[in-house]
Image (cartoon, rainbow, N blue to C red):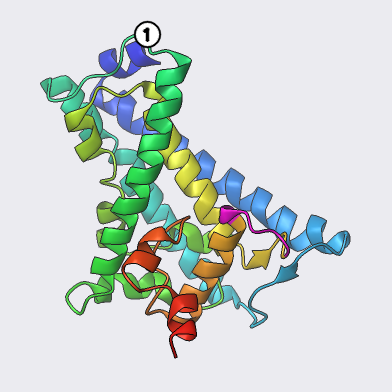
Amino acid sequence: MRDFILNASAIEIMLSGLAFFFCMYFIFCLINIGLSSVIFPAFKKGNILDVRPVNKHQLRREIGLSLITVMIFGLGVIFPWGLLQLGWANLALNPSLLQISLEIVILFFWNELHFYINHRLLHTPWLHRFHKAHHQSMTTTPWTTYSFHPVESLMLGSVLILPMLVHDFSVEALFSVPVFSFFINQIGHANYDWFPESKFFLFQGARRHQQHHEKIHGNFGFALDWLDRWLKTDFCQKMANR
């Protein structure tokens, strides 16, 4: 994979990026729908978070915007690839399993910080007009996950640029970012609490993000609540202080 990335043409990189994001988007969404709409309800496990109905117009809008996002993210891999071609960034050579694991952890926390900053910016008066498209989905669905205005897609899609400029990451760690990011996002937009009794951060994150879509001005974090708590934008914290 490392050799392909370094030696591929720009067209090959962009086509590979499109295929990667397109397949990830539709496969994860269909699995999520199967779990939330069929398997878990069949076994009477979990519950719907927001019972308000979703109409066909919302689904068409979400899929349409998501396809644009897939194109932006897919074609956008040309930018980190360009850093490699210019020599401004490099890929780790023969990284150990420990190095890959540590890099994934570091990128996970960087993704949390990057998302919180950009999400807060998108809720400012100057940029909120670009975030309205995502918040049209008050009752979320798996298709909501990539339902972004193109400006929001560009902002969120820039997550790897700065880390690549300061460290030579492994290919595996870099590829993990869109995968775990989309997986967590899918849980957050499933509109289904798979394990209501669980305190695991991923399932708590799903409840927290559903609250964000309902109430809007709070719970700006991604998978964790630490930045919301530190910066006093956590809904639970707000309710406790009343």
Identify residue for label 1.
94
Judge left or right: residue 121 versus residue 23. left
Label 1's element? loop
Percent across and percent down for residue 235 are 46, 77
In the figure, residue 232 lies in which quadrant? bottom left
- Spot the residue most to the front: 241
Residue 74 sits above or below residue 6 on the image: below
Percent across and percent down for residue 157 are 30, 48
Q: Residues within 10 Å of mark 1 (few under 14, many from 20)?
A: few
Judge left or right: residue 148 versus residue 121. right
Q: Which amino acid type is shown beneath numbered disc 1?
A: Asn
Q: What residue span does the magenta drawing correspond to?
A: 197-202
Query: Which quadrant of the figure contains the N terminus?
Result: top left
Identity of the residue drawn at 26% across and 20% down: 9
The reply to whether residue 66 is visible in this rendering is yes
User: Main SS type for the magenta part?
Assistant: loop
Percent across and percent down for residue 125 are 20, 80
Residue 60 sits above or below residue 72 on the image: below
Asked whether 198 falls inside the magenta stretch, the response is yes
In the figure, residue 10 lies in which quadrant? top left
Asked whether 138 falls inside the magenta stretch, the response is no
In the figure, residue 164 lies in which quadrant? top left
Identity of the residue drawn at 46% across and 26% down: 101
- Spot the residue most to the right: 43
